[in-house]
Image (cartoon, rainbow, N blue to C red):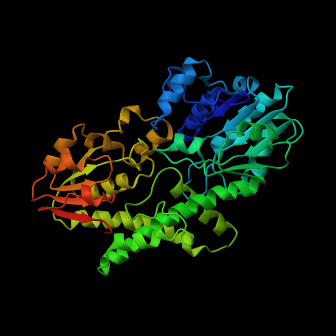
Amino acid sequence: MSAISRSLSVFGLGYVGSVTAACLAHRGNRIIGVDIDAAKVETLDSGASPVLEKGINELVKESRNAGRLHGTTDAVRAVCESELSIVCVGTPSEMNGRIDVSHLQRACQEIGEGIARKQKYHVIVFRSTVIPGTTESVLIPALEGASKKKCGVDFGVCYNPEFMREGSAVADFFEPAVTILGASNPEQVKLLRELYQWVPGKIFETTIPTAEAAKYVSNAYHALKVTFANEVGTFCKKVGVDTESVFQIFTADARLNTSAAYLLPGFAFGGSCLPKDIRALTYRAKEIDLRLPLMEAILPSNKEHIERAAEAVLRCGKKKVGVLGLSFKSGTDDLRESPLIQLVKRLLGEGCEIQIWDQNVSLGKLVGSNRRYIEEFIPHIGSLLVQDWKSVVTSSEVLVIGTREADSGSLASYLNKDQVVIDLVNLDKSRRLAGERHYEGICW
């Protein structure tokens, strides 16, 4: 538990906001979760998490029963009843790649209205990913305009980027590799520093633009690592080199090649962070007449990797395709920019008959931007979802494995030697479905 219990409001009950609220409540703080979506608020108040994430339901239930966590759609009241507001609302991509900060501006308007009614000093902490300079040039003026008060005098603003991975977000929150506290001066970051006094790992106190940039640099590098591993894996396969041996050697060098994270050839990256952040960086570069050829090449390379998977299926000359997995990452229900959805859409356009199984995905339970993405990108995908993985396996001519949650031992007993297995997730050698049937890895 926290040494000092604080009253906090968390704006946005998506993946980042829900995990942040649940974890800080577990530390002993009193949390008000704020969202415009009444369904998310009702879910939180019922003692369940609005998002699917390992370990979060237990934290929500525990803190809700202890009276430390509840939700509301009343943003102004949430600000008035808290010392510090943590903003975790989404910053999705516009068509041209620029980030959409309208949700953030709306949150600033509501928070500003709350600050206007307060006599006490209030601190606002932004966790939403924004281009460097956004907090100082857009968000702080919005807060000042709505509150008619002055930043640094009547309220403080900090930037605290998150580095949580979906599927392990709770663990990442409690044991971050680094914690970044961005502020204009040490006084504004004082309350946030106290809130994170328990955090292990290195803490950096820096300027707001530096904190904003650190998040983008981190995500850009993660995307680069995925792309690099996939391109090298594809090259090695083409020239007849053992991909796994190459990367075993490469990742052994922790001094120069850093960590092995993301450097395992597999399928394309997706989700709500990496694609959006790469687009935003390259868009901003174009605005200032700066060419970033490597950054500009990441998303086309990632898209080409999805096309390789489609070509591998189509080369088989078979129409009945079973797909195991749909979310962008195993163990989550997040479908936003999932490469598997893009693959399915491509195969449907080629006349393939598709059946899909993902134990974590239920379209009826999707909310917010996750649901909107499906409705806009491929609204009829619900008709392709099957609850029984066995029927997907037995009725397919080509089986695409897109999740590590597939039990290869069980799958093997339902496959026949005429079926083609295409592995997109790089199953361990002991789990691969080779033997008499045709097995193909996408880049190994």
Left or right: where does residue 4 sit relative to residue 318?
Answer: right
Give the residue displayed 56% in from the left and 34% down from the top.
Answer: 18
Q: Residue furthest right?
A: 153
In the image shown, does 167 or 322 lie closer to the viewer?
Answer: 167
Percent across and percent down for residue 51 are 48, 35
Give the residue displayed 10% in from the left and 54% down from the top.
Answer: 416
Residue 89 lies, with reference to residue 284, above or below; the image says above
Quadrant of residue 236 within the rendered picture? bottom left
In the image shown, does 290 or 325 lie closer to the viewer?
Answer: 325
Give the residue displayed 31% in from the left and 44% down from the top.
Answer: 381
Percent across and percent down for residue 382 are 31, 40
Quadrant of residue 302 within the rendered picture? bottom left
Quarter of the picture containing the N terminus is: top right
Residue 102 lies, with reference to residue 133, above or below; the image says above
Percent across and percent down for residue 43 are 49, 24
In the image shown, does 365 or 219 lie closer to the viewer?
Answer: 219
Quarter of the picture containing the C terminus is: bottom left
Q: Does residue 53 appear in the picture of this structure?
A: yes
Q: Does residue 350 appear in the picture of this structure?
A: no
Give the residue displayed 30% in from the left and 58% down from the top.
Answer: 428
Percent across and percent down for residue 187 are 86, 42
Left or right: where does residue 204 sit relative to residue 382?
Answer: right
